[in-house]
Amino acid sequence: MDPLVWYVAYGSNLHAARLDRYLRGGRPPGGLRTYPGCRDRRPPRRTVPGLLPGGVYFAGESRAWTGGMAFYDPALPGRAAVRGYLVTVEQFADIAAQEMYRPPGTDLDLIRVAAETGRATLGPGRYETLLRVGARDGLPMLTFTAPHAASDVDWTSPAPVYLGMLARGLREAHGWDVARITDYLAARPGVRGNWPGSRVRHLAEDAVAGARRDGGHRDPAPSEVPAESVRVPVGVPTAAS
């Protein structure tokens, strides 16, 4: 039986169709990059929504979308809306490699290190730091983010197509209505101060309408990751540092 791990998404991969491009390959609508896909192209075994301590912010410049990229900082106030995908360790390695602009096909040792110690860093680039953010059903919950804290970088505005994918993912996974999607996204550093609330609301309305056209699928009710299972690993910069 293949070893399994929870991949915890908080950015555009909240939207299952976007994650599918990492799994099966191809170019997502509105994107500038074509992905080779994973060695194992099967869909996730399960998906579950959840809430993590910390927050999501936007920084840098995306080569795939233009505009700011979403990153997770466990030291930010509030809760980050996430979606867990139960995948094989091999699939997680290939998803991580593609996020890091590395070719898939190499089993990254840092996955084991992150699962055991709480943190592993492959390099200084974006998404090259893996974090263990909890556990579910006895399996580690892993995500990737930047090595820096939100307070260490300038926040940048995300592209509309990118933010729209987050909106669709929030509707799809959490079943949020227009008001809650709008409030959540409008408060993210990088969106706040750069996006009028009316523009964010328009994206939320499109996300809800699209979900209705697609049949209204959503994951089970979201849950808070138990505090005792959450690790803020040693060496991860905090928002106050």
Image (tube, helix red, strand yellow):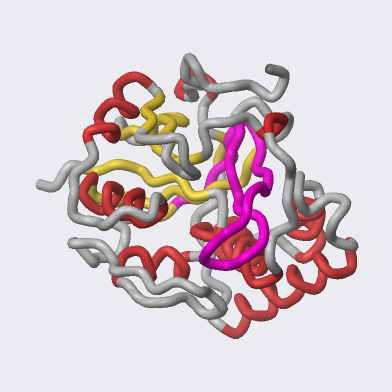
> 87 above or below 169?
above
Q: Against 116, is 110 above or below?
A: below
Q: Is residue 46 magenta?
A: no
Front residue (pair 187, 30): 30
- Residue at position x 52%, y 66% from top? 64
Q: Which picture quadrant has residue 169?
A: bottom right
User: x and y percent of residue 186 in the render?
Assistant: 81, 54
Give the extent of the magenta segment.
48-73
189 lies left or right of 131: right
Residue at 30% across / 22% down in the picture? 116
Is 51 one of the magenta-colored residues? yes
Residue 15 image point, x, y percent: 52, 64
Expressed as whole percent of the image width and height from the top left, the position of residue 192 reads 83, 50
Q: Nearer the viewer, residue 34 or 14?
A: 34
Q: Quadrant of residue 138?
A: top left
Left or right of 96 in this view: 158: right
Percent position of residue 16, x then y? 46, 65
Residue at point 30%, 34% (across, down):
139
User: What is the quadrant of the C terminus in the image?
Assistant: top right
Query: Relative to residue 145, is residue 66 depicted above or below?
Result: below
